[in-house]
Amino acid sequence: MTILFKSSRTKKVLSNERLIKKYHGAYAKSLMNRLVELRAVSNLSLISHEPPPRKHRLKGEFDGCWAVDVSRNHRLIFKPCVEQEGYKEGAINCIVILKIEDYH
């Protein structure tokens, strides 16, 4: 899957293992695993709804976005590159990573 980033800072941090460890130390390994899984699949439907990634759709402030678990509380939040009404997971082959956040 193609992965884009909301900001150049997010791209810089998430493209460098050393920076991932610096900024996301406690859950850096899990974050790197989620990024590898996202890059390896051809579309979003191939990411599991079951743990450890536990892909899920978001509502409210992040309506239209998706998330995968990176720790017990932190999520990697992303949205499809193309906003379409009624799109299916199998059609999403490009995502934009917005942030890593504890939105609970």
Image: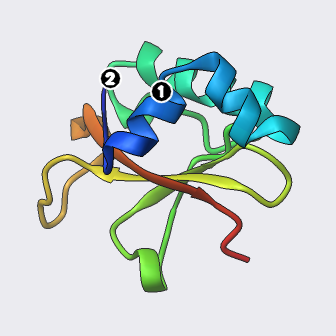
Q: Secondary structure under badge 2?
A: loop
Q: Quadrant of the N terminus?
A: top left
- Looking at the picture, tell me which residue is in the foreground, 9 or 43: 9
User: In screen coordinates, is 1 left or right of 82?
Assistant: right
Residue on which the image places disc 2: 1
Circles 2 and 1: CB distance less than 8 Å?
A: yes
Q: Quadrant of the C terminus?
A: bottom right
Q: Which residue is painted at 62% across and 44% down in the image?
A: 49
Q: How far apart are marks 2 and 1 (CA)?
A: 6 Å
Q: Which residue is painted at 54% across and 54% down in the image?
A: 67
Hey, which residue is sitting farthest top in the picture? 40
Asked which quadrant contains residue 32, the reply is: top right
Q: Residue 5 carries which label?
A: none
Indicate which disc, 2 or 1, sits on the residue closer to the N terminus. Answer: 2
* Badge 1 density bin: few <14, some 14–19, many ≥20, Cα 10 Å: many
Residue on which the image places disc 1: 38
Q: Which residue is painted at 78% across and 25% down in the image?
A: 29
**Above or below: residue 17 compared with residue 71:** above
* Badge 2 density bin: few <14, some 14–19, many ≥20, Cα 10 Å: some
Q: Position of residue 43 (x, y in %)?
A: 33, 28
Q: Where is residue 33 in the image (x, y as percent from the top left)?
A: 67, 22
- Under mark 1, the amino acid is Leu
- Under mark 2, the amino acid is Met
Q: Is residue 52 visible?
A: no
